[in-house]
Image: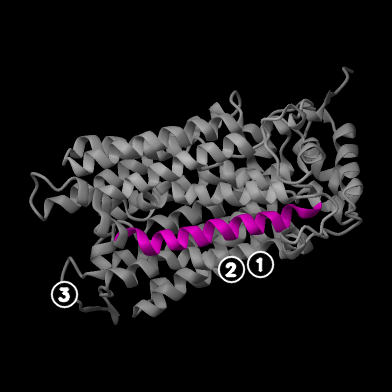
Amino acid sequence: MSEETDSQLLGITKYQLFCVLAASISSVNTGWNIAVPNIPNDIISKCAVALKHNINGLPSCVPVSSYIWGLAVGSHALGALIGANACMWFADKYGRRFVLLYSNVIGIVSAILVGLAVNIDMLISGRVIAGIAQGAANGTFSCYVTEVTTPRARNSLAAMTQMAVIVGQMLGIVCSLGMLRPPLWRVLFSLTGAFCIASFLILPLCTESPKWLITKGKLDKAQKGLRRLRKGTDITREFEKMVAETQNSGDGNECTASLLDIVTNRTPENLRHQLLVASMSMVFQQASGISMLGFFSTTLFNTISSTGETKNFRPKLAQILSAVLFVVGMVSTFAGMLLATHVGRRTLMLAAHGAMCIFSVFLSLGSLLHLPALAITMSYLFFAVFFVGPGPIPWAIPSEITPTYAVGSMTAINNSVVYISAFISGLVFEPMLTAMGGYTFLLFAATNALAAVFFCLFLPETKSKHVADVVKVHSVGVHSVLQAKYKVDSRF
């Protein structure tokens, strides 16, 4: 019998892919909830189809001001902030799969609330609860992907968080086009429960994270799970390395670093650099201007495509443009997953933010000079480039540069930053666009330029690298990765 291949050299296996896809349903649901308020905005908040009336005891629309509607849109991110902070404590104590599985129960409750909402308070409450469920699951998912995949498989599958989110956004936008009239928008919002049910039925077929099982001293179960994930290969060296990483990190049988430990630098390694890079990657993700398209693409396209059409035609055109936008995003994310097998994380982040800076300038010019074709083209290019780098990579950064004992808390901090940023973006973008018009995009050009400079100085390359090797080199406080002594040479 031929000698088995070392599992560390393995790429993507069928069971690895199945587990990642099953766990990704929660992130698809996240994208769905981000997207569904986009197109029905005027129908729900401004009663654009008809004056408010009751259908089977439920109001046909919920008239509110633009500011309150912005709060309703951003409330999902506010809930996700709560879920993201709570999830890793549960994920560290009960397991990654546990959180992915049982967060669906909370999601089903949210589906009932938004589907039966009689006022804006119920709608916001339902979206906050949905955010809690998806914030918990989405944050755990990125950690789960890193822990069940090999370094080679992770090059592509690390982007699955963003891929799943953009698929959910695309589905939400496309379905919105056919479900605008009352009471169908209620069905649209409550379909989040269908994703939860599907996830709850499929996830029991997946293994728990072997790394988490090792931290709990469940070595036999960890070996069994790793064999299923690395079928047909020799797992001896990889398993021994996982156990050694846990012991060398001072884990014992528990994940010991809390959020406060990381923030105050009370950890075995100096994780200030990891904290800076992980947090700023999410700040720049949202400050790049992506939320203007994710939350308000219909509003934006109404603004920049307002020449030559009648008042009734413009929203229809804007809705179609929004739907196409998310199709572009999904294709771009898939292309980015393929590209990530050949190009480093750092290179992708630098190139993407630099390109987004340029596209933002031309988007501003197209808007200010009343050149809708230019502005719309730049919007599509901006969206496409985002999903190659700044979209997926920040989700993977904490678990690729942080030791096992601290990855849970670092992921929670990372998620907190992104959801706070997303909530603020959802709240202020529409008023900012109204006040600043086309000059808004020059602000985003500046933030993308700043992001490129930051990642050039501080983001380490993690492509095809073992987490332990990256941690060993970069756990020395804040430093510039341009210096030769901070290069990680080993791969396997």
- Which stretch did the figure color magenta? 405-430
Residue 31 in the image: state x and y as whole percent. Answer: 46, 53
Residues marked 1 and 2 touching at CB (< 8 Å): yes
Left or right: residue 447 versus residue 42 is right
Look at discs 2 and 3 and give the one toward the viewer: 2
Q: Which marked residue is nearer to the observer: mark 3 or mark 1? A: 1
Residue 225 place in picture, x, y as percent: 80, 45
In the rendered image, the quadrant that contains the N terminus is top right
Sort mark 1 into few (<14), some (14-19) or many (20+) by Cα contacts within 10 Å.
some
Mark 3 falls on what kind of element? loop
**Residue assigned mark 3:** 51
- The residue drawn where x is 45% and y is 50% is 287
Which of 301/126 is in front?
301
Would residue 56 be seen by someone viewing this image from the given angle? Answer: no
Instruction: Identify residue type, mark 2.
Output: Ile
Q: Which residue is mark 1?
A: 86
Q: Which mark is residue 439?
A: none
Q: Which residue is mark 2?
A: 82
Q: What residue is rendered at 91% in x and 54% in y? A: 217
